[in-house]
């Protein structure tokens, strides 16, 4: 993947269920916010040793949504979720793979 493919130019919530990302190469991703929450790769959601998911999908409300989205350096975003989870970091490369 090129740098342009993993460099966002805009990130915004485009509806109650969608996070839109525009990329420097012209691609636009539209990610379902619940699917994004379920894809969290933090140590609380994924076992650090095995890589196995630890997050119980039924514990994530159907109406979960971002409360706050903040940049993490020049490589990722951190999302504070309406279900109280806020430790996940979403690298741009992973976001592009998801959408």
Image (cartoon, helix red, strand yellow):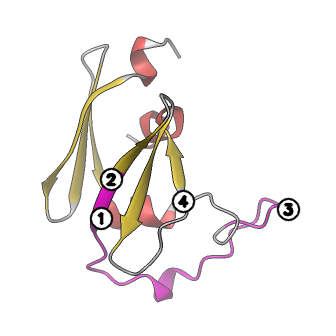
Which residue was labeled with disc 1? 66
For this orientation, the residue located farthest to the bottom is 59
Number of residue marks: 4
Q: Is residue 89 above or below residue 97?
A: below
For this orientation, the residue located farthest to the left is 15
Labels 4 and 2: the sequence-earlier one: 2
Q: Are marks 2 and 3 in contact (CB under 8 Å)?
A: no
Instruction: Tell me if mark 1 has few (under 14), some (14-19) or many (20+) residues whose alpha carbon lies within 10 angstroms of its own.
Output: many
Instruction: Tell me if mark 4 has few (under 14), some (14-19) or many (20+) residues whose alpha carbon lies within 10 angstroms of its own.
Output: some
Which residue was labeled with disc 3? 50
* Residue at point 81%, 61% (across, down): 48
Residue 8, percent from left and from top: 33, 27
Mark in front: 1 vs 2: 2
* Residue at point 39%, 65% (across, down): 80
Which residues make up the magenta segment?
46-69
Labels 3 and 4: the sequence-earlier one: 3
Q: Are marks 1 and 2 in contact (CB under 8 Å)?
A: yes
Spatial CA distance of label 1 from label 2 is: 7 Å
Spatial CA distance of label 4 from label 2 is: 11 Å
Which residue was labeled with disc 2? 69
Which residue was labeled with disc 4? 88
Q: Is residue 84 above or below residue 24?
A: below
Labels 1 and 4: the sequence-earlier one: 1
Instruction: Tell me if mark 2 has few (under 14), some (14-19) or many (20+) residues whose alpha carbon lies within 10 angstroms of its own.
Output: some
* Residue at point 55%, 64% (across, down): 87
Labels 1 and 3: the sequence-earlier one: 3
* Residue at point 45%, 23% (across, down): 6
Labels 2 and 3: the sequence-earlier one: 3
């Amino acid at each position: 993947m090129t740098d342009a493919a993993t460099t966002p130019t805009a990130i915004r919530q485009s509806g109650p269920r969608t996070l839109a990302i525009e990329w420097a190469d012209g691609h636009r991703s539209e990610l379902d916010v619940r699917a994004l929450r379920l894809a969290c790769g933090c140590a609380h959601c994924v076992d650090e040793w095995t890589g196995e998911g630890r997050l119980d999908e039924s514990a994530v409300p159907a109406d979960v949504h971002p409360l706050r989205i903040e940049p993490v350096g020049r490589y990722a975003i951190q999302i504070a979720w309406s279900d109280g989870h806020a430790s996940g970091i979403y690298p741009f490369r992973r976001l592009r793979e998801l959408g």
